[in-house]
Image (tube, rainbow, N blue to C red):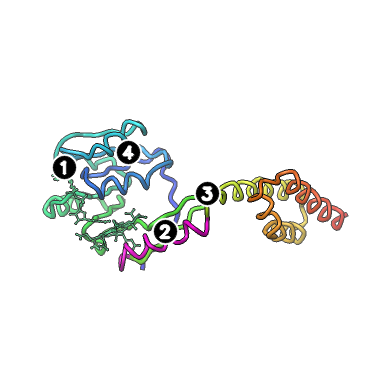
Amino acid sequence: MYYPMMMNLEGKNVVIIGGGHVAYQKLKGLEGTNAIITVVSPEILPEIKEWILRHDAKWIPKEFEPSDIEHANLIFAATNQPAVQREIKKHKKNHQLLLLADRPNESDFITPATLHRGKLSISISTNGASPSLAKKIKKELEQQFDENFGEYVQFLEEARKMILNQIDDPSFRKYCLTRLLDSDFYKLTMKGNIEKRNQLLQNLLNSCNKNFM
Ligand SMILES: C[C@@]1(CC(=O)O)C2=NC(=C\c3[nH]c(c(CCC(=O)O)c3CC(=O)O)Cc3[nH]c(c(CC(=O)O)c3CCC(=O)O)/C=C3\N/C(=C\2)[C@@H](CCC(=O)O)[C@]3(C)CC(=O)O)/[C@H]1CCC(=O)O
Ligand SMILES: NC(=O)c1ccc[n+]([C@@H]2O[C@H](COP(=O)([O-])OP(=O)(O)OC[C@H]3O[C@@H](n4cnc5c(N)ncnc54)[C@H](O)[C@@H]3O)[C@@H](O)[C@H]2O)c1
């Protein structure tokens, strides 16, 4: 089994070798990470070219050489040449993390299908058994967690900060944080009734503070 985790790639060197459909899929997954991204490939798809321009990434238009990964933290090997894939594996150092797009069993990590709604990320993995199933489940969850969900998560983040700032007693804190998930807060956010939702939050904070006094 692979170990699931969320990585902070800000300022980390990510090298993608190959410029086809798989490279593009992995590139899109790096959206918003603020990683330092380099693509090494003699040719790249037009959509990769566009992505690179929009995200201030770098394209080195040539075939892979070992020096390309010398400073990489994360490496995506996505060429269509098994011999090149083997070469990349041979030259990566122990501390570098490598994904071989054609050999999951020899990879240090794999990428799950991921759905983002603001700060909510839902990832689905089949540990390589069926990438298509992971994609299908993601599509189903896209219906359940619609676009508005991001705003709800943002509300929860802000309300949670208020609770942590205002309530010191651990048991009242826990109670308040649990009550924050009452369906009323969700329903009012979805209806756009922000005034009523904020009033409800204030009532909750007041009741927790009063009980504490
Ligand atoms: C989820 C997703 C995320 C992403 O890419 O970011 C992802 N593959 C996606 C799509 C997809 N991939 C393939 C098809 C064609 C149908 C089919 O073959 O089933 C489709 C469907 C399509 O494109 O519609 C073919 C394929 N994939 C791998 C191999 C090699 C092998 O199995 O040996 C081959 C055969 C190549 C060949 O035939 O030569 C390997 C991997 N693909 C993974 C991830 C990792 C396991 C994820 C997991 O199970 O948890 C893993 C192990 C490594 C990795 O790449 O990370 C993304 C959906 C994104 C989305 O839309 O949300
Ligand atoms: N993991 C996955 O999700 C997944 C899905 C489909 C396919 N695959 C595997 O990934 C491989 C790539 O798939 P694709 O659809 O992107 O292929 P593709 O043919 O669209 O792209 C291959 C890319 O590799 C580049 N390339 C070739 N030789 C190179 C070299 N020496 N140095 C640098 N770049 C080089 C080419 O210029 C091209 O841009 C396939 O061979 C397949 O085994 C993986």
Range of magenta residues: 128-145
State the separation of the CA atoms marked 3 and 4: 28 Å
Q: Which mark is residue 147?
A: 3
Of label 3 and label 4, which has the lower sequence position? 4
Observer-nearest of 153 and 56? 153
- Find residue 36 and report its horizontal and vertical position in percent: 35, 37
**Badge 2: residue crowd in 10 Å (few <14, some 14–19, many ≥20):** some
Q: Is mark 3 in CB contact (under 8 Å) with mark 4? A: no
- The local secondary structure at tag 3 comes to loop
**Tag 1: amino acid:** Phe
Residue at 16% x, 42% y is 64
The yes-or-no answer for disc 2 within 8 Å of ligand 1 is yes
Residue 63 appears left or right of 165: left
Q: Which mark is residue 182?
A: none
Q: Which residue is labeled 2 in the image?
A: 139
Q: Does ligand 2 reach within 8 Å of label 1's beta carbon?
A: yes
Q: Nearer the viewer, mark 3 or mark 4?
A: 3
Within-10-Å neighbours for mark 1: few <14, some 14–19, many 20+: many
Q: Quadrant of residue 180?
A: bottom right
Give the quadrant of the C terminus: bottom right
Q: Are marks 2 and 4 in contact (CB under 8 Å)?
A: no
Q: At x 27% / y 49%, what residue is drawn? A: 76
